[in-house]
Image (cartoon, grey):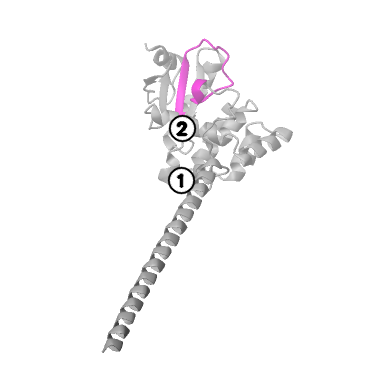
Amino acid sequence: MASSNAAKSASRREQLRAAREREAAAARRKRITVVAVAVVVAAVLVAVIAMAAGGVFGKRSGGSGATSTVVSVRPPHASPGDKGVFSADNVNDSAPVLTVIDDFQCPICHTYETVFGPVFESLAKKGEIRLEYRTRYFLDINLKNDSSVRAARAAAIADTFGKYQEYHDTVFSNQPAKEGTGYTDDQLRNAFPQAAGITGDDLAKFQSSYDKGEMNAFVDAVDRQAQADGYNGTPTFLANDRKIDMPRKTNPTEDDIMKLVRGV
């Protein structure tokens, strides 16, 4: 009888020992799992930080290069606060500023550019106004492409060679009849700059800047600022930052424009 009790007692001790070992093993597995999860989370965070630092999250689908949050390269004629680009046609720094807010894929912008553009440029060359362009690219979202932002970047690069106005006009004069067709890289980095007068070594420099995305951050800054200012439709026109309505005319005169600019 005593032998039987001893055996039962030994069996219970063995069961308790086995249970403690199972609990200890489970605790070890839990610690290992927690450590592993922590390592994975840390690795993901490091990767995210590295990607953000490298501008990965600033890349646009189909676009060239990455977007930086810091504007390090600006067009020579950039307006204060990176709001836009002044036309090189301007000759009078004290003249009132006429601002055009447009999108290179906007059909209505094309219409206004065709009718009013030559009048604006004539006034700028006469010193009556200072012509400024602020380019938006929100139509890329609607049209599911990235032609507006690529065209804006290319136009900003053209200013490096004093050809922003010519490049701007070239893009609009070649806007596809079917909205959403967009522009090819060959047009933006080869055909259009040549049509705007950028040739030879300057063309090679233009193409290198385009491929490197040197004006990406500047173009993004212009678009963000216009959005922050509430200019979410194109075309929009400003006279010294005061919104004005352009008349729906087919033959506007310089006097028509100056009355609007002066607030008459």
Instruction: Say which of 110 and 31 sits in front.
Output: 31
Image coordinates for residue 215, horizontal then vertical, percent: 57, 34
Which image quarter is the C terminus in?
top left
In the rendered image, residue 74 lying in the magenta stretch gets the answer no
Amino acid carrying mark 2 in the image: Asp
Per the image, the residue denoted by label 1 is 180
> In the figure, residue 247 lies in which quadrant?
top left
Which structural element holds mark 2?
A: helix
In the rendered image, residue 87 lying in the magenta stretch gets the answer yes
Q: Is residue 79 above or below residue 50?
A: above
Per the image, the residue denoted by label 2 is 223
> Is residue 175 in sight in this rendering?
no
Residue extending furthest front? 2
CA neighbours of label 1 inside 10 A, class few (<14), some (14 to 19), many (20+): some
Which image quarter is the N terminus in?
bottom left
Whichever of labels 1 and 2 marks the residue nearer the N terminus, that label is 1
**Magenta region:** 80-101
Q: Residue at horizontal 45%, vertical 57%? A: 35
Amino acid carrying mark 1 in the image: Gly
Q: Residue at horizontal 51%, vertical 47%? A: 46
